[in-house]
Amino acid sequence: MARVFRTRTFTRWMRKAGLADADLLASVAEMADGLVDADLGRYVVKKRIALAGRGKSGGARTIVATNLDDRWYFMFGFAKNERSTIGPAELRALQALAEDLIALDAKAMAIACDTGEIVEIGS
């Protein structure tokens, strides 16, 4: 069974953007079926999510750390009208974070959840 998490930073952004956990879970279901917008390498993928009244093309872009199997971490998000993409330095930082998140064992995930660094959704 897939486990879905959001980072503290992503959580703050998604509340401002008007996204809900149900939106994230729906996008994970799509990604699990192969509907990824871009594979950015080193466990990082980009996925568009519709925002109310804007649809997917004018909606949110999310950056997700995943092993494309049982763990999905929403790390970063932005609205298309805020910016067009992420820069090379941001991508490298997100790839490093993704590698750290994917490497977490059960004990480290529990600690990260207890401290609020990540929040598990859909559980």
Image (cartoon, rainbow, N blue to C red):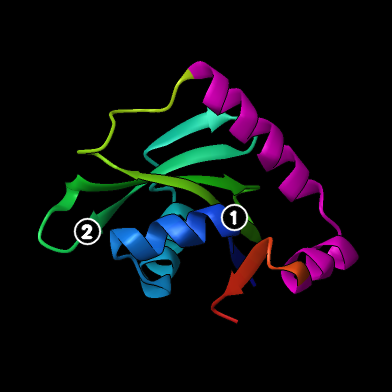
Is the residue marked by circle 1 packed among few (<14), some (14-19), or many (20+) residues within 10 Å? Answer: many
Which quadrant of the view contains residue 104?
Answer: bottom right
* Circle 2 residue: 51
- Most prominent secondary structure in the magenta stretch? helix
Return the x and y of residue 123 as percentages of the image width and height.
60, 82
* 8 versus 88 height, above or below: below
Q: Can residue 2 be seen in this view?
A: no
Return the x and y of residue 48 as percentages of the image width and height.
32, 47
Q: Which of marks 1 and 2 is nearer the N terminus?
A: 2
Is the residue marked by circle 2 packed among few (<14), some (14-19), or many (20+) residues within 10 Å? Answer: some
Image quadrant occupied by the N terminus: bottom right
- Residue at position x 50%, y 54% from top? 10
* Circle 1 residue: 73
Disc 1, SS: strand
Q: Residue furthest left?
A: 53
Which span is picked out in magenta?
88-114
* Viewer-nearest residue: 26 or 8: 8
Return the x and y of residue 55 as percentages of the image width and height.
15, 54
* 86 versus 100 height, above or below: above
Determine whether, in the image, residue 72 is placed left or right of residue 61: right
Q: In the rendered structure, which amino acid carries the disc numbered 2?
A: Leu
Determine whether, in the image, residue 75 is placed left or right of residue 34: right
- Residue at position x 73%, y 49% from top? 101
- Residue at position x 65%, y 47% from top? 67
Return the x and y of residue 106 as percentages of the image width and height.
85, 66
